Image (cartoon, rainbow, N blue to C red):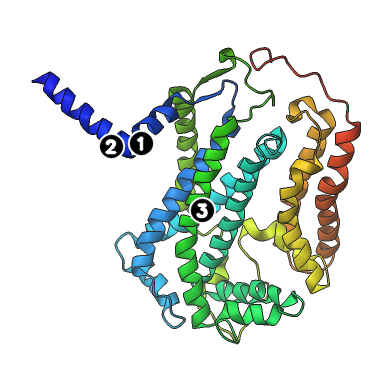
Amino acid sequence: MKKTTTSISDSIINWIEYRLPIFSFIKHSSEYQVPKNLNYAWSFGSMAGIALVFQIITGLFLAMQYTPHVKMAFDSVENIMRNVNYGWLIRYMHAVGASMFFATIYIHMARGLYYGSYKSPRELVWFFGLFIFVATMATAFMGYVLPWGQMSYWGANVITNLFSAIPFVGDDVVIWLWGGFSVDNPTLNRFFALHFLLPFVIVGLIIVHIIALHVHGSNNPTGVEIKSKRDSIAFHPYYTIKDFFGFGIFFMIYFYFVFFQPNMLGHPDNYIEANPLVTPAHIVPEWYFLPFYAILRSIPDKLAGVVAMFGAIVILFALPWLDRCKVKSARYRPLFRIFTYMFFVNFIILGYLGGEVAEEPYITFSQISMGWYFSHFLIILPLLSKFEKTKPLPDSISMS
């Protein structure tokens, strides 16, 4: 009887496997070989993935109660917070989750910059990661508009008006984004629809990102490729356990903010209903936009500011060609390591300056920080590629 049962289950598995090789994919994932020296910096990609899952789940429940209409959006959010069972928890998890998602993405990207994960043969892994980053920024911006508070409304006005700087077609693009001649109900409807759709686009990009990663495998702290079986171990159970430990730390920080400091990362003006007749004294986007917002404000000319802001993201796509040093990891590049730390500090300073009032001395400091940001990519990295004396690489991961 036992043999018959086993035979039937094997037949079902084989029938499914022939038509959809899901079991072989699971086996591949469990036996997937990764460098044996990966540290906890490599856990942030998995953390970003779990943060996205929470965003999609909580977003689906919020969408069931939200009303995308300018006269009802703010009240519908208040209704979720006050009257829907555990609505406050779902909304705080979604709002805090956005910050957690960006925090893990920024650390994940910083790890890629530090260890040279953007270099050959992993350029496409880096590119799809940047596409995920851009799609996430668009999703977060549209989601910030939905509560229809003061910062939501005026933030939408400021950011959408940037497209008017495009020569010849800018004004038409802004009208198309608005769905009319001002930020109003058609704008809110469009943003709600796109905010609901884009997370699933991000999931698709993540799948391609992971497929590209599996072609040549993960980079590692030495930057040396796997040369023998001694250099690698199976992803499961060694790194699944490591990732789950990372998840534990992630959830402790996540739920600390959810239960004890849910509004710390937001702006109090967004708890005031949007009023087109009252402009806030200081328009501040969410913290994860602030470095790029500082670059935008540091240039008096509107078009130049927009070009610089978008250029700060676009330049990341050119990184594999700007940094041509054959040594990947900062561990074996002393000067590169110093300048990379300086770049990280400068990026944090830009974030601080983006949250301050657009007046002196903050504007001057923003211009200096912006200059350093672009100089790092356009001047420092190309020079280091030519003149830096690197440390000798180990013969293999096992020898490091």
Q: Do the numbered discs 1 and 2 sit on residues whose CB atoms are within 8 Å?
A: yes
Residue 104: give x, y in percent of width and height. 57, 44
Q: Residue at x 52, y 39 (%)?
A: 211
On the question of residue 16 being in view, the answer is: yes
Q: Do the numbered discs 1 and 3 sit on residues whose CB atoms are within 8 Å?
A: no
Residue to which mark 1 is pinned: 22
Q: Is residue 345 left or right of residue 335?
A: left
Relative to 382, is 85 above or below? below
Q: SS class of the residue under badge 2? A: helix
Residue 202: give x, y in percent of width and height. 51, 53
Badge nearest the viewer, 1 or 2? 2
Q: Nearer the viewer, residue 86 or 123?
A: 123
Q: Nearer the viewer, residue 322 or 240?
A: 322
Residue 80: give x, y in percent of width and height. 36, 67
Residue type at the position of mark 2: Ile
Residue 206: give x, y in percent of width and height. 52, 46
Q: Earlier in the sequence, mark 1 or mark 2?
A: 2
Residue type at the position of mark 1: Ile
Q: Nearer the viewer, residue 132 or 309?
A: 132
- Given the current orientation, which residue lies at the most extreme left position? 1
- Picture quadrant of residue 280: bottom right
Badge nearest the viewer, 1 or 3? 1
Crowding around mark 2 (Cα neighbors within 10 Å: few <14, some 14 to 19, many 20+) is few
Residue to which mark 2 is pinned: 16
